[in-house]
Amino acid sequence: MDGGTPTASIADVAAAAGVSRQTVSNVLNAPHRVREETRRRVEAAITALGYQPNRAAQALRAQTSRVIGIRIESIQIDSLTTVHDRFLHALAEAVQAIDHHLLVFAADDPDDEIGTYTRLHRTGAVDAFVLYGIDEDDVRPRQMLHLGAPFATFGRTGHDTDHLWVDVDDETGGAAVAQHLVARGHRRIGFVGWPEGSSVGDRRVAGLRGVLDKHDLLGECAGLDLRGQDEIANGVTLGGILLDRPAPPTAVVAASDTLAVGVVQAARARGLVVGRDLAVVGFDDTPTAGVFDLSSVRQPIEAVARSIVRALQPHLPAGGTPPQPETEPSTSEVFAGRLLAPTLVVRASSAAATPR
Amino acid sequence: MDGGTPTASIADVAAAAGVSRQTVSNVLNAPHRVREETRRRVEAAITALGYQPNRAAQALRAQTSRVIGIRIESIQIDSLTTVHDRFLHALAEAVQAIDHHLLVFAADDPDDEIGTYTRLHRTGAVDAFVLYGIDEDDVRPRQMLHLGAPFATFGRTGHDTDHLWVDVDDETGGAAVAQHLVARGHRRIGFVGWPEGSSVGDRRVAGLRGVLDKHDLLGECAGLDLRGQDEIANGVTLGGILLDRPAPPTAVVAASDTLAVGVVQAARARGLVVGRDLAVVGFDDTPTAGVFDLSSVRQPIEAVARSIVRALQPHLPAGGTPPQPETEPSTSEVFAGRLLAPTLVVRASSAAATPR
DNA sequence: GATTTCAATTTGATCGTTCAAATTGATAAC
DNA sequence: GTTATCAATTTGAACGATCAAATTGAAATC
């Protein structure tokens, strides 16, 4: 099991095709320099030997590992786990599309974190980093700028935005939910969210309230905004409080699917049918949302991953790679940061308002 | 942002310390060959320049990348997401402990999967692989053996076990749950599990039934074994069916926390208090289990990760690394495969049996 | 026919590290 | 005083790829 097929080197291919190393290299990297007939002969030898250029040799010569690094955390907030998973997978795909590899590493000790970035960069193991879970007053972007390694973040801080970042426009997401509910006739719209201070949560409410304000509904919705940690149990409690009000909301927006599921339970416990007596909308479109037939705001995680890689690309040492063909709206503009709009996935839980 | 601190090479250190390249190398790799005073001088230069040996150069020279590869999947079963996450993180840590890196890659097309393994191995990017989610009749271990790259699996097939594998002893887990419940006076113990054919699920029931049989309870528990896909909704439905029986179980074991949560909901909907009127036990000890105060069988994921790395170590090209000091029970025995016992985390949901 | 031109191909050198062999310099042995 | 012994250190070579410069050979120019 240990041995395996001895890997062919460029010299083996050259010998097999009766040419020199450099000609083989040219066939792969500058085919126009090689005569048609020679090219075919070399290509045949490459196929026959199953030759693949050695990554370490390329890295040493080109002074670039073609590796992107990302730190993974040990414990995530329950509802974010699925976002994290999708992101990691999407990032792996995006990175592979430009012939790079994705290296993950653990660095739980906060002191260790920046040290690990430094080490990975200094040893040439990693060309650039992706950071996620950036919040309002995160110090890491600044530290990274000081380190000098190229990096991009999923999420942005409140202040310094002089680095590459991509984020989901949570405000737009919140607004979309509000518009959807208002269009369906809801006027008393409640909110069950996270405690203030989480930038993501705060933006979601902001978007929501913006639309409510536009429709002059803030008055009617006053006092219908409750907060708690991201746990199902809190959704049950807070949702229950809202529903027990003298004038309960006809729709409840939750900052996460986790909280939304709790609200659904609270409604059921009161004999209400979600999607008929009460509209509930969550965020993140987790698998759970599908199971509960819950309308939810889906993050464009895959697009975020691609966008991050695209932002990073001009800063990678391996500049030679041709910029991948654009599938999404052209962004030839200079890149500082970029917001991607989420999409509201409408399911049965967000029906029209019916008087109770 | 692109430049960064120019990384020092061994030649820079040598020049700074007034010695040759090789002496610097010796200070790091064979200190006994170097005179005390020289060693100190070189070490000072290393610190001053922040020198870190270049990974690509080492890889090229030693013909080993010191990288372990693992494929990540796009969509996981909800309840397994958290196990997957824990495993990835634990693996990253275990791998770092032996001075290796962890490379993740996506390969969703099944044809592509083995091709990707081959490519990563042939290019020298990855020394060895870790595969997980192996089930009964998985063909991948056989394919990997043919590939020739060292690998170890989390999970085992039914047949060929002539490769390195580590698995959780799910049968023991099921048995532990049964023993716990029987000890607390339960006699009618129901089971809500996955459809037959999933090796993990089947082993969990097997362990359970073994203990029930030993206590002559199989008769009393007849017909209390229901199956469905791993969704909360199925837990609700199946749990409901069990609780509506003329002689309902006093305890329900679920194959996952997801199903267990469904059972809890079904119980509550019937006015039963879980932990008093009904005992419920799940599997995997997800964050959800904690929130619901649910007893659950915790997988020793971190131990699995360490064990996998330890199994892999003698097969890694970088054989020079000293075998890490053993924290767990010594396993100097020859390694074919290894089962690790899970632990039952007892919470409020699994109280003693009370007559209804 | 000698010289220029140019495409096709080869040789030399390098990236940073480490193994193997060679060199240096001191002390011990005879 | 020459030689053997040995520790400490240095030089040479190699891992595999690719850039830059050199070489080859044939066709075009005068």
Image (tube, coloured by chain):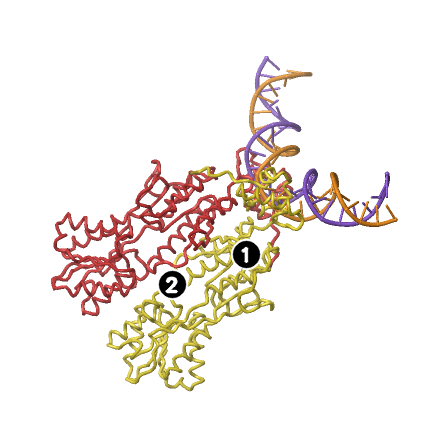
Chain colours: A yellow, B red, C purple, D orange
Q: Which residue, given by chain and number where applicable, does mark 1 sit on?
A: A98
Residue type at the position of mark 2: Ile
Res B153 visible:
yes
- Quarter-of-image position of residue A316: bottom right
Q: Position of residue A345 (x, y in %)?
A: 40, 72
**Of residues A264 and A51, which is closer to you in this image?**
A51
Indicate which disc, 1 or 2, sits on the residue closer to the N terminus. 2
Q: Amino acid at mark 1?
A: Ile
Crowding near the residue tagged with mark 1, few <14, some 14–19, many ≥20 C-alpha atoms within 10 Å:
some
Q: Quadrant of the C terminus of chain B?
A: bottom left
Is B191 left, or right, of A243 in this rendering? left
Reply above or below: B98 against C24: below
Above or below, D19 against C10 in this view is: below
The residue that mark 2 highlights is A77
| Marks 1 and 2 in Cβ contact (< 8 Å) | no
Question: On the image, which quarter does residue A185 sit in?
Answer: bottom left
Q: Chain of mark 2?
A: A
Q: Which-is-in-front pick, marks 1 and 2?
A: 1
In the picture, the disc for residue B5 is none
Mark 1 belongs to which subunit?
A: A
